[in-house]
Image (cartoon, rainbow, N blue to C red):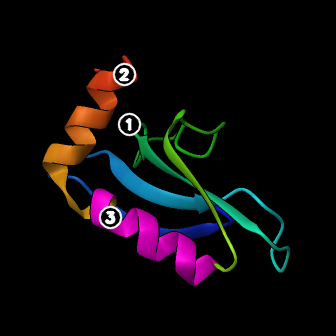
Amino acid sequence: MDGILYERTLPHGPAVRIRRLSVAGEHPVTAVLEVDRRAGTPRSNIGNPPPLMEFEGATEQEAVEALEPHARDDRRISQLMREKGLR
């Protein structure tokens, strides 16, 4: 999937991703934190999951630095999914 700045797989299968929404090289950079519950299935590349968080910054690195602490924290991911009604 194009635009993935960070990705890790949760123990129960879904993928946590930081995905760039803006065109590569475009500034400011808009990125989202999302959980793809279809990761590893034939439907994993169809559409995009709803964003849990969104960030706009000057560079991709700035976006990753802002969203990665949330992406690495399983408890925070669960909390965000509950808040968005995805769990």
**At 21% from the left edge and 36% from the top edge, which residue is drawn?**
78
80 left or right of 29 in image = left
Quarter of the figure that contains the C terminus: top left
- Give the residue displayed 61% in from the left and 39% down from the top: 48
Marks 2 and 3, how far apart at CA: 19 Å
Q: Residue at x 48, y 73 (%)?
A: 64
- As rendered, which of 54 and 36 lies closer to the eye? 54
Residue found 32% across the figure and 30% down from its top: 81
Which residue is more in the foreground, 6 or 2? 6
The crowding category of the residue bearing disc 2, from other C-alpha atoms within 10 Å (few below 14, some 14 to 19, many at least 20), is few
Element type at marker 3?
A: strand
Q: Compare residues 35 and 85 and report the one nearer the observer.
A: 85
Amino acid type, mark 3: Arg
- Residue under label 2, please give it: 86
Disc 1 vs disc 3: Cβ atoms closer than 8 Å?
no
* Label 2–label 1 contact, CB within 8 A: no
Q: Callout 2, which amino acid?
A: Leu
| CA neighbours of label 3 inside 10 A, class few (<14), some (14 to 19), many (20+) | some
Q: Is residue 31 left or right of residue 73?
A: right
Q: Looking at the picture, does residue 85 appear above or below residue 20?
A: above
Q: Quadrant of residue 38?
A: top left
Marked residue nearer the N-terminal end (2 or 1): 1
Residue 37: mark: 1
Whole-number angstrom distance, CA of label 1 to CA of label 3: 12 Å
Mark 1 lies on a secondary structure that is loop
Residue under numbered circle 3: 8
Residue 78 lies within the magenta run: no
Part of the protein shown in magenta? 60-70
For residue 78, above or below residue 3: above
Q: Position of residue 31 (x, y in %)?
A: 61, 59
Which secondary structure type mostly characterizes the magenta part of the structure?
Answer: helix
Depicted 1 relative to depicted 51: above or below: below
